[in-house]
């Protein structure tokens, strides 16, 4: 059964957690980053052309404050660390995406994926990355996924088991709710909050992806408020993964979401996760301008 925001608020945090995960506990801390009254933009690094120094130079020139790291983090760890010494840019998040194998892979695949997530935590500690992005298991893959309740139970066990290690490393395991047609569980903010609440540790949080939440949340301001204790990362994108400002509904949707961000005092990074590589560098400046206007109006 999907949980919407209204039913979540009706039963409260502990009630929601009990509904999805028996034995839920209240969160040990509130990891939302607060204290900013401005947008803090981060960019996908792999959307920018050139070698690593050229990429960082362009991102800095455009007015970004951070980068989201994607790719083979074990292979790139040393290069990223060395390059970051020569720039004011900081990492906003590290993408990690093998949760499906932990939920439904073979024993060997599960062990390897857990080891990979542990290595991601070590990398985040080394590079001082505040968030590790985790996406629920995707549908339509070769994996024979268990039902949603079992999938959630496995995710809860894995993230709960690594939450303390993540917190000690100065990072957070952030789960990203995704629409039901794409993943088999954790499909909205309320379900993500219930997961974090049931774990009850500060080393877990939420990624709020505008692209996905525009599709599943009717009220983005209210969704932000629902996720307030745990939202650690924002992904900027229109419904169709185009740059914000390129679709007709973007003005109202980002105004709605930004009002929620201001209401909860979100002060973390907002990372562009959208566009096409061949046009990103030409178009992202206009999108940043559009978003700043919506932020000022919110």
Image: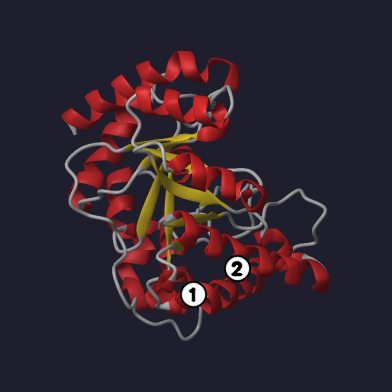
Of callouts 1 and 2, the N-terminal one: 2
User: In the rendered view of the protein, which quadrant contains the C terminus?
Assistant: top left
From this view, report whether residue 222 is shown above or below residue 102: above
Q: Position of residue 209 (x, y in %)?
A: 45, 44
Numbered disc total: 2
Q: Is residue 280 visible?
A: yes
Disc 1: which residue: 165
Q: Nearer the viewer, residue 133 or 148?
A: 133
Seen at 38% across and 64% down, the residue is 7
**Residue 167 x, y percent position in the rendering:** 41, 71
| Contact, mark 1 vs mark 2 (Cβ under 8 Å) | yes
Residue 247, numbered circle:
none
* Residue 297 falls left or right of residue 141: left
Marker disc for residue 118: 2
**Residue 47 is drawn in which quadrant?**
top right
Determine crowd level at label 1: few under 14, some 14-19, many 20+ residues with C-alpha closer than 10 A. some
Q: Is 265 placed left or right of 271 in the picture?
A: left
Residue drawn at x 17%, y 51% is 35
Q: Look at 58% across and 49% down and name the residue there.
A: 78
- In the rendered image, residue 159, in percent from the top left (x then y), is placed at 54, 71
Q: Quadrant of the N terminus?
A: bottom right
- Numbered disc 1: secondary structure: helix
Of the pair 134 and 21, the residue shown nearer to us: 134
Residue 32 spot, x, y in % from top left: 29, 59
Instruction: Examine the rendering and report whether any part of residue 147 can be seen.
Output: no
**Badge 2: few (under 14), some or many (20 or more) residues near its Cα, within 10 Å?**
some
């Amino acid at each position: 059964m999907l949980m919407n925001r209204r039913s979540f608020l009706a039963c409260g945090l502990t009630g929601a957690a009990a509904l999805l995960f028996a034995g839920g506990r209240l969160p040990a801390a509130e990891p939302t980053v607060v204290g900013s009254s401005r947008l803090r933009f981060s960019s996908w690094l792999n959307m920018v052309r050139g070698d690593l120094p050229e990429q960082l130079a362009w991102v800095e020139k455009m007015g970004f404050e951070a980068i989201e790291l994607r790719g083979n983090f074990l292979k790139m760890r040393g290069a990223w660390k060395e390059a970051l010494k020569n720039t004011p840019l900081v990492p906003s998040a590290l993408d990690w995406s093998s949760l499906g194998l932990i939920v439904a892979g073979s024993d060997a695949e599960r062990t390897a994926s857990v080891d990979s997530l542990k290595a991601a935590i070590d990398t985040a500690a080394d590079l001082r990355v505040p968030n590790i992005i985790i996406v629920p298991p995707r549908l339509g893959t070769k994996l024979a996924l268990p039902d949603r309740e079992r999938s959630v139970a496995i995710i809860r066990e894995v993230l709960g088991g690594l939450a303390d290690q993540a917190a000690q490393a100065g990072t957070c395991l952030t789960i990203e709710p995704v629409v039901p047609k794409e993943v088999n569980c954790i499909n909205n903010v309320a379900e993500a909050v219930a997961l974090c609440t049931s774990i009850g540790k500060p080393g877990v949080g939420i990624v709020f992806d505008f692209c996905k939440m525009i599709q599943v949340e009717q009220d983005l301001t209210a969704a932000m408020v629902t996720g307030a204790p745990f939202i650690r990362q924002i992904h900027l994108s229109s419904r169709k993964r185009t740059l914000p400002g390129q679709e007709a509904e973007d003005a109202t949707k980002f105004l709605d979401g930004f009002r929620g961000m201001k209401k909860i005092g979100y002060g973390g990074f907002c990372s562009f996760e959208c566009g096409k590589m061949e046009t990103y560098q030409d178009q992202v400046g206009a999108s940043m301008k559009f978003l700043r206007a919506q932020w000022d109006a919110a």
